Amino acid sequence: MTIPNQILKKILILPPSEKAELIDKLISSLDEPDKEIEKLWANEAESRIDAYQQGKIKTLTLREVLEKYK
C-alpha cells in the first residue's frame, strides 16, 4: 500500500471535526506563495512595463479586447 493510501486509511477513521481541521490545514498549505514563481512574475511585469514605456508594445482598451471575443 502506498503512503498516501496509508494516510488516507488513517484519516477516514477520524471524527468529522478532525477531518475538517485536517482539510483546512491542507488547503491552507496550498495557499503559500512560491518565492520563485513570485520572482518570475515580478520580472515579467517589469519587462512588460519597460517594453510599454519604450514603445515596443501597445495597449488595448477593454472594448477592443471584448470585441475580439464576440
Image: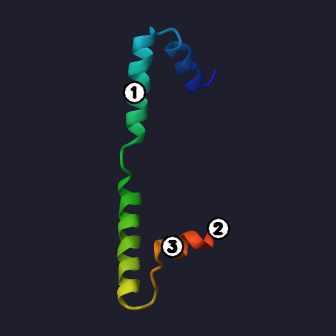
Which residue corresponds to mark 2? 70
Front tag of 1 and 3: 3
Q: Is residue 35 left or right of residue 23?
A: left
Q: Secondary structure at mark 1?
A: helix
Location of residue 3 (image quadrant): top right
Query: Which of pointers 2 and 1 lies earlier in the amino acid sequence?
Result: 1
Relative to 38, say whether 44 is above or below: below
- Which residue was labeled with disc 3? 63
Who's the residue at 48% across and 79% down the image? 60
* Closest to the observer, 39 or 61: 61
Identify residue type, mark 1.
Asp
| Residue 21: % across, % down | 38, 20
Label 3: few (<14), some (14–19) or many (≥20) C-alpha neighbours in 10 Å = few
Q: Secondary structure at mark 3?
A: helix
Estimate the spatial distance between the alpha carbons at disc 2 and disc 1, rounded to whole Å. 40 Å
Picture quadrant where residue 17 is located: top left
Q: Earlier in the sequence, mark 1 or mark 3?
A: 1
Foreground of the two, 11 or 2 = 11
Q: Nearer the viewer, residue 70 or 25?
A: 70
The residue beneath circle 1 is 24
* Nearer to us in this view, 9 or 50: 50
Quadrant of residue 70 within the rendered picture: bottom right
Question: Is there CB contact under 8 Å for labels 1 and 3?
Answer: no
Which residue does the image show at 38% across and 52% down from the upper left?
A: 34
Amino acid type indicated by mark 2: Lys
Q: Are marks 2 and 3 in contact (CB under 8 Å)?
A: no
Q: Position of residue 62 (x, y in %)?
A: 47, 71
Image location (x, y in percent) of residue 41: 40, 65
Residue at 62% x, 67% y is: 69
Task: Tell me: residue 8, above or below residue 67.
Answer: above
